[in-house]
Image (cartoon, rainbow, N blue to C red):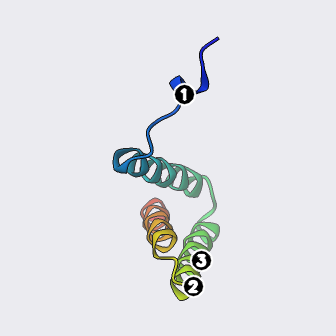
């Protein structure tokens, strides 16, 4: 049995970017499975969530949600 540390990635910029990219891919694939009206609603919800984070001063979360919004819009087009 291997220890847990051998199964974890370092928390650095490369890992964070990989996580954001993977989340974007997941959003893209999910939106592609939805009917057209649901695709637009999904993208709009992500934009609304990003706005809420902006109002709360949570710029890191806002930025990630905007990336997810762009992935949803790309999948819907």
Residue 53, compared with residue 14, is above or below; it is: below
* Alpha carbons under labels 3 and 1: distance apart: 34 Å
- The local secondary structure at tag 1 comes to helix
Label 2 environment density (alpha carbons within 10 Å; few <14, some 14–19, many ≥20): few
* Closer to the eye: label 3 or 1: 1
Q: Nearer the viewer, residue 26 or 10?
A: 10
Q: In the current view of this chain or complex, which residue is farthest to the bottom?
A: 55
Q: Which mark is residue 49?
A: 3
Q: Quadrant of residue 11?
A: top left
Tell me the quadrant of the picture where the N terminus can be found: top right
Residue drawn at 49 percent across, 74 percent down: 62
Residue linked to disc 1: 5
Residue 34, compared with residue 42, is above or below; it is: above
Tell me the quadrant of the picture where the C terminus can be found: bottom left
Q: Total marks drawn?
A: 3
Q: Position of residue 26 (x, y in %)?
A: 54, 49
Mark before the other along the chain sequence, 1 or 2: 1
Residue linked to disc 2: 56
Q: In the current view of this chain or complex, which residue is farthest to the top?
A: 1
The answer to the question of whether label 1 and label 2 lie on touching residues, with beta carbons closer than 8 A, is: no
Residue drawn at 51 percent across, 69 percent down: 61
* Alpha carbons under labels 1 and 2: distance apart: 34 Å
Q: Quadrant of residue 32?
A: bottom right
Q: Position of residue 49 (x, y in %)?
A: 59, 77
Label 1 environment density (alpha carbons within 10 Å; few <14, some 14–19, many ≥20): few
Q: Position of residue 16 (x, y in %)?
A: 42, 50
């Amino acid at each position: 049995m291997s220890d847990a540390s051998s199964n974890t990635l370092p928390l650095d910029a490369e890992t964070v970017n990989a996580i954001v990219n993977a989340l974007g891919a997941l959003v893209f694939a999910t939106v592609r499975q939805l009917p057209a009206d649901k695709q637009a609603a999904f993208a709009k919800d992500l934009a609304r969530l990003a706005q809420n984070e902006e109002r709360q001063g949570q710029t890191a979360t806002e930025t990630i949600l905007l990336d997810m919004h762009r992935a949803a819009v790309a999948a819907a087009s």
